[in-house]
Amino acid sequence: MLKIENLHVRVEGKDILKGINLEINAGEVHAIMGPNGSGKSTLSYILAGREGYEITQGSISFHGKDLLEMSVEERAWAGVFLAFQYPVEVPGVSNIYMLKAALNGIRKHKGEPELDAMDFIASVKGKMKDLDMDEKFLYRAVNEGFSGGEKKRNEILQMSVLEPTLCVLDETDSGLDIDALKIVSDGINRLRDPARAFVLVTHYQRLLDYIKPDFVHVLANGKIVKSGGAELALELEDQGYSWLEDKKAS
Amino acid sequence: MSASNENIKDMIGQQYKDGFVTDVESDSFAPGLNEDVIRALSAIKKEPEFLLEWRLEAYRHWLTMEHPEWAFVEFPKIDFQEISYYSAPKSMADGPQSLDEVDPKLIDTYNKLGIPLEEQMRLAGVAVDAVFDSVSVATTFKEKLYEAGVIFCSFSEAVKEHPELIKQYLGTVVSQYDNFYAALNAAVFSDGSFVYIPKGVRCPMELSTYFRINAANTGQFERTLIVAEEGSHVSYLEGCTAPMRDENQLHAAVVELVILKDAEIKYSTVQNWYPGDENGLGGIYNFVTKRAECRGDNAKVSWTQVETGSAITWKYPSVILRGDHSVGEFYSVALTNNYQQADTGTKMIHLGKNTSSTIISKGISAGHGQNTYRGLVKIGRKAENARNFTQCDSLLMGDQCGAHTFPYIETKQPSATIEHEASTSKISEDQLFYCMQRGISAEDAVSMIVNGFCKEVFKELPMEFAVEAQALLGISLEGSVG
Amino acid sequence: MSVTHLPNTHYAGLLATATTSKIEAEADWLTSLRERAAAEFNVAGFPSPRDEEWRYTNISAIEKSQFSLSEKTAEVDQALLDEALLEGCYHLVFVDGYYQPKHSSLAGLADAVTVLPLSEVFTGSKEQQDLFKSLLDSVIEEHAQGFINFNTALFSDGALVCISENTVVDKPIQLAFISSQDGALKLSNCRNLIYAMASSKATVFETYTGVADSCYLTNVVTEVVVEPNANLTHSRLQAESLKAYHIGGVYTRLENNAIFQQNNYTFGAVLSRAEIHANLSEASDCTLDGLYIGCDHQHMDNHTRVHHNQPHAVSNEFYKGVMDDKARGVFQGRIVVAEDAQKTDATMNNRNLLLSERAEIDTKPQLEIYADDVKCAHGVTVGQLDDTAIFYLRSRGADEQMAENMLTFAFANEMVERISFKPLRFKVLDELLKRFPQAGMKKEWL
């Protein structure tokens, strides 16, 4: 589904990613872990197409197409979803309105008719219930005045409504207490599907206790320094990242 | 203010462009303004003596006035002798004969607004009789109003049919000496609308310039007078459905509203005159005086405006709250893109006891646009317990534009309460990226955010008007997101 | 947009006749600067209400009163002096616009700090003269309004204050301006120059007082430069006679990372205008506090202007006014954010109370913004006391009048409590209590 080859990225003259290779197939869950400043968030922004990053080398293909050639919204239409580490407040625009606009944009792109408003609201409300979100959130401005946990749940709600094929979750566990983390993880697990892949970008093992990854990659200093199964995450939890840094230095 | 006079001549002098029709010299006045021009104008319109005198008084006073310089707008000096002050109403035959002859950009705009074809033709000035029976619509409409006792006609018609009402109310809210452009308008106004709602009548439908067939093509100096008698109610819509075709470049209108005891007027405007091109060339100068006077107790007036057009907008729909417990409201969205300039706001003059006013102003600046809110809240000595709440928000898009807030608050009443808040925000890269990541295109994202920003004003507009206003904002902002 | 207005013949006459040097051994460059200012004055005169910036303040009474230039006085009433001087400060005293050495005291002032009356500049060192030359007229914008030109043409004295790099001044420096005039319709023009060099820290007060009920005009201009990382607190207390006229201005340039706090307390004068202008460079921090308390027929105009010229600067402005009797309070504040001043954070607040049916408040808070990535907000209220608070106090036994007085006092006192230097805080409090004797407050309780 997603193939990243030899990706080099520079930001403001500084090399952040220095040759990333990663292949992700439908149905897989990949965790990307690493110390702060290793380039994890950069990788998620690159996948979503954020400006301000200079790709100096390498390629990313998504469903066989050149992802880097696509605009931000084209990627969204094609099925890329980024759950933001810091979801953005959009004052004046209600949640329901944005969800509808986003979903209809994707459906239009797929050549599907717009959803009936009543059906749409009913389906969204069902999904909100699963995430233990109050219906009143639908009519509040996007993320405005939401607590950290509410924002994260709102991201998962959007994900479940838009039904992307590639879900990139950037530090989704940060700012969540244990109860909220369970709800959010359950929400994510419900979306696991043979046709859908997940990339979990996280600093801590914590999220992986609830969402079991198929693969774990350790990103350090702009490169994937180690890949393995779910057990690698536990190893990191025990030993921290410093042993990796040491290894690299030696 | 030093552009060449040549330019301005081109902009103001032309009566017809875009190849609309040619032979106009014969029924237009030569450019220029003097007492003879005014006499001739009044004679053509067969006006009573009092009106001619009134025009002449205005003109004589206008000669003594200086062009106002205080607004936050810049434009070359206007030569008032270069303007023709009368051109005969266009007959249908003068207009384009089919939509093919109309500027495709205009048609494009209509399509985006979802305006039906017949409507497009009417708006574009295409002779529509054959396709669309406007006369019959107008007739049924008039009958219904007649039954209710409502008078709704062109100003010229009112002068002939109801001279006593004109004499009683004309110039009593905006005098013929009021300000430079109001005086000029009083001297040379060509036509406009007149509305009279009798005592206790609730106007059975929303009145709009849409139906004002007779008053079409009123030119650059139009005058509107609305009188709401005791306990009556009317909602008046102006500029309606779409951008009106109007080649005139200087638009100096006057609107007077008289609201008596327990009466209410709701006046909504969607202004989308030609804003000039993306380089700031051309466009309408929209210098308008609009004022309402709440003469009786419990009178209420509400101005709602969505201003997306015009190269320069300069207007302050105002309310004089004379009656006790009277209420004034002003809801405004003003958008400036490219090189548009807007200096707009309101004046709330509290004279009566327990009067209250609300001002919600939303300014959007994009491109090189300059957007200024200028508002006065004045509480007179006797206006006990007067209340005002003002909120002015500015939204900036891009770093070449400007947003300015100039409120004036003058209070002479210790029991008055005035609150004013202003804020400035921008559409951030983060917000755009977030929306785009959810599959919403940059332009749709901007339009969503902008419409959210304007929500408080749009909810004051009649439903179908609000939908159009939203679409208009989208169109006006096209190309402002890079 | 300034409106030209013919100069008043009396004042133009003063300029024409008083052409000899006003300061001992005045240098030629100053004389020609004065001539230029006089020429500008002769074209535009004093501002008129037709000028948008002067729309609420008509100075025709100043024109009609035909004040004449004050002269050096030998003696000054000791009681007046005692009241004017604040404890714990260095003092520079000016009476009727002239330096009074015998009442001034700079004992203990560090060498790194220059505090000098302008009347002694040209008899002082070359460094001092150069400093004076480089500062004078360096902060004021072009085409200054009439009172500034009038001041430049005629100033007789004033203070030059310069704090060297990395110097912290141990005590505040008080510039005390006292009018000893008693009915002679005199005017004085002083000019102050304050220069806080890089990384210095200082507090400077300007106080204005005069013989009670005497009629005179004070026309003062202060120019301030705050260099990178310097921190300057500047407070002005205007407590002139209730029949006097006071036109004053503080014009400031803040360089990168400079910190400037300006406090402006207005109690005196029948008509007064204070102009506080600040030009902000990158990442500078500017705080403007103001309090204006008017009664009788007083007219108080506060005119502030904050220019954000460069990115990342912060400004906070907070002005409070209380108008009683037939007093009229004016607040005109303007924040300008230039095109390059991204990440500006600017707020302006103006709160007013009207206590009488005959009093008036006119307020005009303005934002003029040319940059898009900025946080700007302003808020204004004109209103009355909180009904529930009055009710609460009454329910605890205060009578209604008492409750109102207490709350009014509390409203104003919020600004007073922000003053950290005690002698000044008590002085401002005294002035406040003079206006609210009925508040039943005693200083000891506060």
Image (cartoon, rainbow, N blue to C red):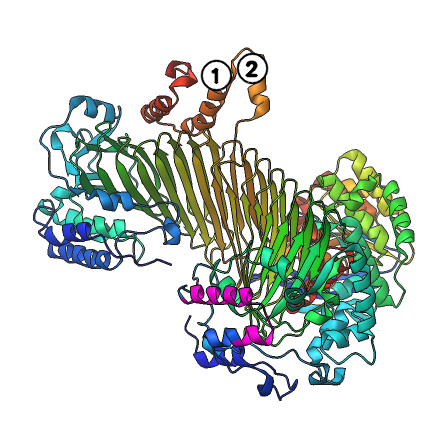
Is residue B62 found inside the magenta-colored segment of the image?
Answer: yes
Q: Using the rendered image, report if marks 2 and 1 lie on a common chain.
A: yes
As rendered, which of B57 and B86 lies closer to the eye? Answer: B57
Q: Is residue B380 visible?
A: yes
Q: Earlier in the sequence, mark 2 or mark 1?
A: 2
Mark 1 surroundings within 10 Å by alpha-carbon count, few (fewer than 14), some (14 through 19), many (20 or more): some
Mark 2 surroundings within 10 Å by alpha-carbon count, few (fewer than 14), some (14 through 19), many (20 or more): some
Q: Is residue B428 left or right of residue B146?
A: left
Q: Which mark is residue B420?
A: none
Query: Which stretch did the figure color magenta?
Result: B40-63
Residue, x 72% and y 72% (percent of image)?
B109
Give me the chain letter of mark 2.
C
Q: Is residue C267 left or right of residue A181?
A: left
**What residue sits right under mark 2 in the picture?**
C394
Look at the picture and state if C10 lies above or below B338.
above
Residue type indicated by callout 1: Met
Q: Position of residue B467 (x, y in %)?
A: 76, 60
Which of the image's four quarters has the C terminus of chain C?
top left
Q: CA distance from mark 2 to mark 1?
A: 9 Å
Which of the image's four quarters has the N terminus of chain C?
bottom left
**What residue sits right under mark 1 in the picture?**
C402
Residue, x 69% and y 52% (percent of image)?
B266
Q: Position of residue B374 (x, y in %)?
A: 52, 53
Residue, x 61% and y 59% (percent of image)?
B334
Give me the chain letter of mark 1.
C
Which quarter of the figure has residue B238? bottom right
Residue, x 10% and y 28% (percent of image)?
C75
Q: Position of residue C295 (x, y in %)?
A: 37, 29
Q: Position of residue C424 (x, y in %)?
A: 32, 27
Which quarter of the figure has residue C111? top left
